[in-house]
Amino acid sequence: MRLYDFGPAANSRRVRIFLSEKGIEIPIVELNVREDAQFKEPFTTMNPFHCVPFLELDDGTVIAESISICRYLEELHPEPSLFGRNAAQRATIDMWNRRVELDGFMPALHASRNDIPLFKGRVVPGTRTDLEQLPEMVQRGKEMLDIFLARLDPQLANNAFIADANISIADITCYFVINMANHFEMNIKSKYPNIFRWHKEFSTRPSTEA
Ligand SMILES: N[C@@H](CCC(=O)N[C@@H](CS)C(=O)NCC(=O)O)C(=O)O
């Protein structure tokens, strides 16, 4: 089994944090997506969506999508559980992870891709197009992200973690949403004190260095 990733990329780091939290070690092949390695063979055939991370199994099967990779590894290494140990835990963690991805990560991603000069010509991950970066998408992405943050903050008022008594995949996903919110200077400290506390604590975990 081999994991293909790129150190600085948020989705690669999501899987690396997951591996570290679980104490799993697997061989990693670094693909420099900023230099377009994902568009060259054999990688373009392995993942036609041209994104990292992706996991190659020993029989040649390729699993892309960060969460799908993590779910696969969770089945091989159930402890410590990051997706839940019973039906209710699994559903609750899945609910929060979906909220974080759909309502937080996606708006933040569109805002970033339409704002940061590095992403010029790359507004859709895994593509090279002449689609312009749109300032309106930055603005709307930030507005949508702010709605998500306002909904998340109360959840963290009395909970150490987002979806469970312990760290779960939802916390790992959300760590990157808050990093992006901080990039956009969204006043987390003053507007969302519970998220600020949670993010500060999460940032001290050794896995975030992975
Ligand atoms: N939904 C995918 C997204 C993967 C993704 O967007 N990866 C980015 C790095 S964070 C990438 O490889 N981008 C390459 C590119 O834009 O060309 C996942 O969760 O794994």
Image: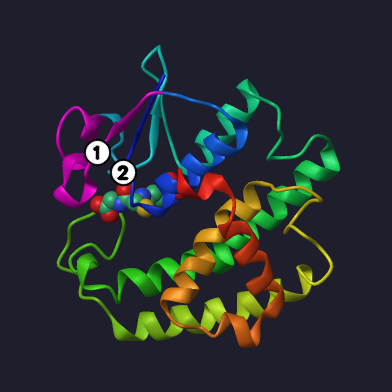
3D distance between C-alphas at marks 2 and 1: 5 Å
Q: Residues within 10 Å of mark 1 (few under 14, many from 20)?
A: some
The amino acid type found where label 1 is placed reads: Leu
The disc at residue 43 is none
* Residue drawn at x 58%, y 29% as measured from the top left: 23
Considering only order in the chain, which callout, 1 or 2, is on the residue closer to the N terminus?
2
Magenta range: 27-45
The spot of residue 11 in percent (x, y) is: 43, 49
The disc at residue 6 is 2
Please give the residue where the numbered disc 1 appears in the rendered image.
Answer: 31
Q: Is residue 157 left or right of residue 72?
A: right
Q: Is residue 205 left or right of residue 122?
A: right
- Is residue 28 rendered magenta in the image? yes
The spot of residue 67 in percent (x, y) is: 54, 42
Q: Is residue 166 left or right of residue 73?
A: right
Within 8 Å of ligand 1, the CB of disc 2? yes
